[in-house]
Amino acid sequence: MATPTEEDGEGEGEEDGEEEDAPTHLPFAPTSEELLDDTTTVDPSYTISLIRKLIPKGSNLVKEFSDKQSSSSDDGESTLPEYKDQWEDCGCILWDLAASEPQAEHMIDNSVLEVLLENLRVADSSRVKEVCLGIMGNLACHESLVDAICLEKGLITTVVNQLFLDDVKCLSETFRLLAAALRCSASVSWAEVLLPDEILSRMLWIIGNTSNLTLLEKSIDFISTVIDAQDVIAALIEPLLKVGLVDHVVGLLTTEIEKSSEEKLDRYDLPFLEGLFDILPVVPDDDQARYALWGTLPRILPQRQETEMNSSSLDQFASLFLGKFTLIKDDLESHVVDEENLSSEDALVLGWTSKCLRSISFVMEKWIEEKSSQSKQDAPSTGNSIDDAREVLSYCHKALH
C-alpha cells in the first residue's frame, strides 16, 4: 500500500507538483463568500447538459437521461465525454454550482448523484474521482439535501471505499465529504458504515502517515467532527479506541504542537480538547473509554505549561476550562477512589487527572493574573469572571491536596 504523502495521484500530467499543498479545486466546505448568489440565474437546461456530459461512456444512465430529459444538443452522442478536458471542465463548473443550494437542489433533481456514483465505480482517473467527491462534498453541505444523498443506493458505502485510494487529493475530498456528512441530521447513517475495524484503521493510518498539509487538515477536521457529534462519538468511540485512536491522534497533535505557530496550535488543539471533554458524560460507565480519555488529556495539556501564551490564546483556554469544568468535576466526583487501596489502573487514572488539574491551575493562575492587572476599562469582555476562575482554581488545589 502506498503512503499517501505525494502531492498528486496518477494521471495528473503537467499539473503535478506545481503547488504542493494547494488543492486543484474547491477543497473546503463553501463559506458565505464562496456561495453563489441564490438569485443568480443559470439556465436549467445548461446544468442538465453539464450533468449529461459526466455520464461514463457505455453507461445505462445515457438511456435513462434520454427518457427523462430532452437532449440539450443536436446529437445525443456529443453530450458524452470524448476528452478528459471536456469532462473536467464540466465537472468543475458543477462543483462550483453545487455550492449554491438552489443549484444543488436542481442538480439532485436531475440525477447528478447517480452520475457521480457511476463515475466513482467505473473511473480509473484519480482526477475524475476527486471532482466527483468534491461535488458531493458541496452537496452535503446543504442540510435540506441530506436525505436525498443518504437515500441514493450504495452512495455512502462507495464514498467510504474511496478511503482505500492512494491519491492525496481524493483522500482530502473524501475526508471533507465525510466531515460534512457527520455534521448533518443523518450523521448516524454515515457513522454506521465507518464501524468496521479495517475502515477505522485505514483512517487512522492516513492521519498518522500523511505529510500533505491539505490532507492533514481535512483528516483533523474529520476527527474533530466525530468527537463533537454526540451520536457519532457514542457509536464510534469503542471501535476507535480499539484500533488505536489515542496513540494516533495524540502522536499527531503533539507533533503539530511542537512545530506549529500559536494560531495553528489553537486551531487544532482547542477544538480537539473541547471534544474530549464533551465525551466525558458519554462514557461514565465505560472503564476502557474513560481510561483512554484521561490518558489522552495530560499528553496534550502539559505542552501548554512550557509555552508562552499570548492574551488571545490564554482567553481561549481559560474559556474552554471554565465552560467544561462542570463536566470534569462531575466525572471526578462520580469516580472517587480509595487512595490507600488503588488498583494499578486507578493509580494511573489518578496520576493523569492530577496532571490535568495542574495544567488547568496553570492556565487559571495566568489568566487571573493578567485580568487582575488590567483596569476595568482596558480589560476586554470575555464572558468569564475572575471569581469563576478562582472557584475553578480553588477546586483544583483542593483536589490536588
Image: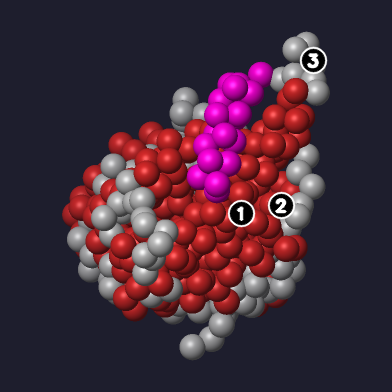
Residue lying farthest to the front in this orientation: 340
> Hey, what amino acid is under mark 2?
Gln
The region drawn magenta spans 381-401
Q: Residue at x 75, y 12 (%)?
A: 376
Q: Which residue is mark 3?
A: 375
Secondary structure of residue under mark 1: loop
Give 400 or 66, whichever is nearer the viewer: 400
Magenta stretch: residue 398 in it? Answer: yes
Is the residue marked by circle 3 packed among few (<14), some (14-19), or many (20+) residues within 10 Å?
few
Q: Residue at x 75, y 30 (%)?
A: 369
Secondary structure of residue under mark 2: helix
Q: Earlier in the sequence, mark 2 or mark 3?
A: 2
Left or right: where 38 falls relative to 390: left
Give the spatial CA distance, label 1 vs label 2.
Answer: 8 Å
Q: Which residue is mark 2?
A: 305
> Hey, what amino acid is under mark 3?
Ser
Left or right: where 214 falls relative to 377: left
Q: Residue at x 38, y 65 (%)?
A: 342
> Hey, what amino acid is under mark 1?
Leu
Q: Residue at x 67, y 62 (%)?
A: 256
Give 92 or 385, whichever is nearer the viewer: 385
- Residue 14, numbered label: none
- Residue 301, numbered label: 1
Q: Are marks 1 and 2 in contact (CB under 8 Å)?
A: yes
Give 248 or 282, whichever is nearer the viewer: 282
Magenta stretch, main secondary structure, is helix
